[in-house]
Amino acid sequence: MKALITGGAGFIGSALARHIVGTRLGSAVIVDKLTYAGNLSSLAPIAESKRFAFEKFDVVDQDALRDALARHQPECVFHLAAESHVDRSITHAAAFIQTNLVGTFSVLEACRAYWESLKGEARSRFRVVHISTDEVFGSLGEKGAFVEDTPYDPRSPYSASKAGSDHLARSWFHTFQLPVMVSNCSNNYGPYQMPEKLIPLTILNALHGQALPVYGDGKNVRDWLFVDDHVQALLLIAEKGEIGRSYNVGGRNERANVDVVMRICDLLDALAPREFSHRNLIAYVRDRPGHDRRYAIDATRIEAELGWCASETFESGIDRTVNWYVGNRDWWTPLRAAWSQRQGLPA
Ligand code: NAD
C-alpha cells in the first residue's frame, strides 16, 4: 500500500498512517495543514521510517496537491482532512465550508488530473477513499439504523459541510469516472484523540478532578467505533471496495453519552482511585443547539461484501483507551494545556 493521507496528523488519519507504515510496512505521505487538531507527535512512532513523508499545506491549495501527487505517485488517496468538531462548527462555520467543501473539491480535482495522467495498471489500481460521517443522515428516533441509502438530512454546519463533500465525491465518480469510494462512519474513539472530544475530555478531566460535562440529559446515543477497527475498514474499502459505492462503518456499540462517561468513571475508580467515585464529578450542562438525539449504523454492506467486522466491543475498546491515556501523559499534557488556554480554563 502506497498511500497519500490528507489530515494524517489528526486522530483517525494518524492511526491509519501508523498502521500502514508501522504494521503493514507500506508507505504513507501525510498532507496536513496542522490546524489546532493536527499533531505531529501522533506520528512520532513512524516519523523515522523511510516509508513515511510529511507535507505541510492546506488541501484547498490544489497546485500543492497536484505537485505532491506527481512526486509521491500514491496508489490510493485517503481524504480525511476536515474541520471535525461540531461545537466549533456552531461558532466558526467558515472554516468548515472552506476545508470540508472547497478542500474536498480541490482534492477531487487534483486526484482527477493525477489519475488521468497515469497509464496501464497504475491507472486501473488508483483509488480515492473519501471519509465521511454518519451525521450526514440526521437524527434517529428510538429505533432503526442508517443504511447507505438513507436520505441525507444534515443538521449542523459540520454535518452539512460533510454531506456536501460526499455529494461532490460521488459526482466526481458519476461525471468523470474518478474511482472514488465514500465511507460514512460512526463516532470513533481510541488513543491519540484530541482532548476536546467527549471520551478524552472525560478521561483527562477525571484524572484532574475536574467536572465531567454532559450535554442535556445525557441520553443522546452514539454508535461507538474503535479507531483501529475503522482503519481496517478503510483499508478493505481501498483494496476490495466497489468504485462509486458507499460503505457505512459502525461498531454496533450504541451507548448513551452519560453511560459512556459513567463507564470511564468506573474504570478510573480502579486505575486512579480517589476518596470518592469519579461519578461524583459528572455535571449536566446546557444542551448543544440542534443536538442530534441518536445515531446508529447498519454495517451490513461492509460486513457482507468486504468481510469487515469490528473486533472491539465497547467494553474492550474503552478499557484500552482509558489505559492508554493513563499511560501516555507525555502525549496529552501539552495538548491539554493548549486546549485549556483556548478555553480560558486552568490547565
Ligand atoms: P481531526 O480533527 O482529529 O483531524 C483532522 C486533521 O485534518 C488535522 O490533522 C488537521 O490539521 C487537518 N486539517 C484540517 N483542515 C485542513 C486543511 N484545510 N488542509 C489540510 N489539513 C487540514 O479529525 P478526525 O477525528 O481524525 O476525523 C478525520 C475524518 O473522519 C474527518 O473527515 C471527519 O469528518 C471524519 N469522521 C470522524 C469521526 C470521528 O469520530 N472522529 C467520525 C466520522 C467521520
Image (cartoon, grey):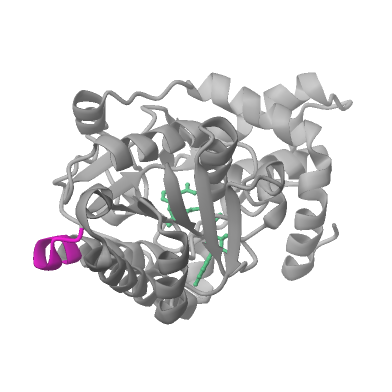
Q: Which residue occupies 18% across, 66% down?
A: 172
Tell me, yes or no, if residue 326 can be seen here. Answer: yes
Q: Quadrant of residue 187?
A: top left
Q: Which residue occupies 24% across, 28% down?
A: 306
Q: Nearer the viewer, residue 22 or 145?
A: 22
Q: Which residue occupies 42% across, 80% down?
A: 63
**Residue 219 sits above or below residue 286 on the image:** above
Magenta region includes residue 265: no
Image quarter where the N terminus lies is top left
Query: What range of the chain is rendered magenta?
Result: 172-178
Q: Nearer the viewer, residue 43 or 193?
A: 43
**Residue 35 sits above or below residue 192 on the image:** below
**Residue 65 sits above or below residue 200 on the image:** below
* Residue lying furthest left: 174
How many marks the image carries: the answer is: 0
Q: Position of residue 52 (x, y in %)?
A: 59, 50
Q: Position of 132 compared to 212: left or right?
A: left
Q: Position of residue 80 (x, y in %)?
A: 44, 56
Magenta region includes residue 176: yes
Majority secondary structure in the magenta region: helix
Q: Which residue occupies 78% across, 19% down?
A: 270
Q: Position of 14 compared to 181: left or right?
A: right
Q: Nearer the viewer, residue 255 or 282?
A: 255
